[in-house]
Image (cartoon, grey):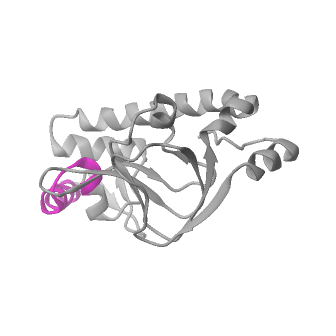
Amino acid sequence: MNKIFDDLNQVDLQRIISKSTIIEYDKHDIIFSKGSNPEFLFVLLEGTVYVCDDSVDGKRNILTIVNEKNDCFGEVYLFMDLDYPYYSIAITKVKVLLIPKEVFLSEKVLTDRMYKFLAEKAYILSRKLQVLMKNSLREKILEVIKIKDVVYLKRYELAEYLGVSRPALSKEIYSLIDEGILELDEEGIMNIVER
């Protein structure tokens, strides 16, 4: 995916960084809270961040996984002037660049890049919607493996991503393996068996 700083010249990059703040978060720290007012674009420099929402019964649902350097999060609500309807949490030790909203008003180079970035984010969300629209858990598992978005997740994280219970997910995965539809490689990553 295109990152907001890809191929940005050093002069523009240094000017933007000089107007921004770098903050480090420890594992399990909340980066922004549900209901808080967006003030910054968050750019991941190191680590992994989940953007989540909790169900009424307290179950965490993973909306987005941010784990690539220079990937952004929290961008949609920044530009819509709405409070966050979800929260973000550091899954590892994380370093984040916080770019104030005002910087976008004065930096055309950022605005131009944001158009492409937002289009790519919309594409990723449409792929997740493709997964969630499948009728059965079996179809959801196979679809998520086909698009290769989250196959590196631990089982409980994949369950949270799909919005299902871990026992139900494990049962269906083992059924798919027993039927010869799925296989696990040496690293435990699921793959669809070629026929």
- Asked whether, in this view, residue 121 is left or right of residue 137, the answer is right
Q: Position of residue 24 (x, y in %)?
A: 58, 67
Residue 12 drawn in magenta: no
Residue 130: which quarter of the image?
top left
| Residue at image point 82% right, 50% down | 14
Q: Nearer the viewer, residue 71 or 13?
A: 13
Towards the viewer: 130 or 50: 50
User: Furthest residue to the right?
Assistant: 11
Q: Which residues are magenta?
A: 159-178
Query: How far across and down, in percent of the image, does residue 85 sit?
Result: 33, 42
Image coords of residue 145 (percent x, y): 36, 47
Q: Quadrant of the N terminus?
A: top right
Compared with 71, 25 (above or below) is below
Prevalent SS, magenta region: helix
The answer to whether 58 appears left or right of 30 in the picture is left
**Viewer-nearest residue: 143 or 95:** 95
